[in-house]
Amino acid sequence: MLEWSRPGDRTREFEDTALVHLDTLYRSALRLTHNRAEAEDLVQETCLRAFRAFHRFNPGTNCRAWLLTILRNEFLNRLKRGGHEVLDRDRGDLERGATSITDAGRTRGHPEEELLQTVLHGDVDRALKALPLAYREVVILADLEGLSYREIAQVVDCPIGTVMSRLSRARAQLREVLGRFAREHGYVKEWE
Amino acid sequence: MNCVEFEARLHPYVDGELEMADMAAADAHLAECSGCQGRVTQERQFRHLLRRQPREAAPPELRATIQARVRRTARIAAIRPWIIGTTAAVLVVVALLPALRPTSSLVTELVSKHGTYAQIEQPAEFASADPRAVEAWFRERAGLRVTVADYSPSGIRLVGGRLAEAGNQKAAYVLYEKGHTLMSMFTVPASAPDLVLEGARVSYRGHAYVTLERTGYNTVAWSDGKAVFGLVSMLGYDALLECADRLRLERAERAGA
């Protein structure tokens, strides 16, 4: 059960297979927690958990998605321990508010180039913060870390169809928020 | 495919996640619909904006810390069968310690216990974040009257209690945690005749303490005539002395009450 005769091999294998994804874990943690110290703590805990469970990891399968799944679970546990039930509450709101958000994003018709040019450094992270967690996580995974729908479905534990619909709503909402920032900066005039 | 159908597939289309047949149908629609072409351009630009975000790397110190902790965990996994394989093994180790190392002082003994407990998955025999519950457990379990201070306002969380042996007698071990750093609080009845508190003598808020660093751990120890107290942790001396002072205050308040 314990590979205690050759601890060095297991450590090296873990470093080669898992720790190569440390940057992805760190960036994702940072965007989930919005706090450097918390993100570092979360990543440390994730890596230790992963190492302890490394014998359950199937070599050749997707290690990045496996690690992100552990990170997400640990993050949700911490939220729960802190008395939050963010994800569940969000989920209800998501399905209810879904159509109006998509419609808003669509009919608004921002002059896209203008929006893109005026988004300042840090705006995207700030806008992500305004998104419900279930939206924030799919954007982080798809657009900032480049995971496939399939990988995301594994990490957030839902069907691919749900990933797809959540992603489109999340992006619409993100675009809304970024548009608002751009107007706040005064770089884009009110066009209504 | 019409515009409504295309809109429903817009995101997987742009993400390259459509099935082959759907992809062909979408391309065919796009070839003759400038409106939907505009939507695709818009989404692609937005995607580009997101992908253009700075890709920050994990701080090198974080990487180093994780590597060190992973290696330590691996080493512990290697030794663990010997340390905590059976309860009997634990008892034997504890009982032999004084015999093997007759010169070892109480503080050194506490440090080595802290080190061992820190490596066990669940070091507390009785896990609770409620100081009163932990006190009750010591009382009922071993007849030990222990004051368990509440340090939670300082972010030091109570994990639970455990019975230990120190200076050849029963000792109460209270475990706290600040983030990932453990802090042990030992209370040993002062009746043991040959307890030695070695280290540097310091004074903090008018009280005398003995501080000592052993194998990377800081310790603060003191005696109040009834018991000997020892704090062991990787936390700094400031934090440990503050904890010590607060425990003293709490004991004084209760004695007065």
Image (cartoon, coloured by chain):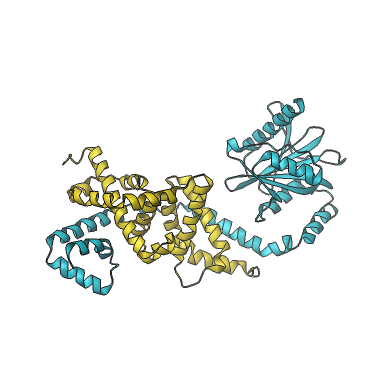
Chain colours: A yellow, B cyan
Position of residue B254 relative to residue A189, above or below, is: above
| Residue at (50, 71) in percent of width and height | A58
Point 29% across, 57% down: residue: A168
Could you tell me if residue B52 is visible in this image? no
Vertical order, B125 against B1 (above or below): above
| Residue furthest front as drawn | A96
The answer to whether A37 appears left or right of A126 in the picture is: right
Q: Is residue B34 above or below residue A178?
A: below
Identify the residue at image location x=47%, y=53%. B60
Residue B128 rendering spot, x and y as whole percentages: 66, 45
In the displayed image of the protein, which residue is found farthest to the bottom?
A: B21
**Residue A103 visible at all:** yes
Residue in front for this viewpoint, A180 or B61: A180
> Where does residue B184 sit, x and y in percent of width and height?
69, 44
For the N terminus of chain B, the image quarter is bottom left
Q: Can you give x and y, in whole percent of width and height, for residue A96 in the image?
A: 34, 50
Q: Give the number of callouts.
A: 0
- Where is residue B83, by image quadrant? bottom right
Q: Which residue occupies the foreground of this view, A102 or A39?
A: A102
Could you tell whether B155 is left or right of B139 in the image? left
Image spot of residue B100 (x, y percent): 83, 55
Q: Is residue B146 left or right of residue A10?
A: right
Q: Quadrant of residue B21?
A: bottom left
The quadrant of the picture occupied by the C terminus of chain B is top right
Q: Left or right of B215: which side holds B192?
A: right
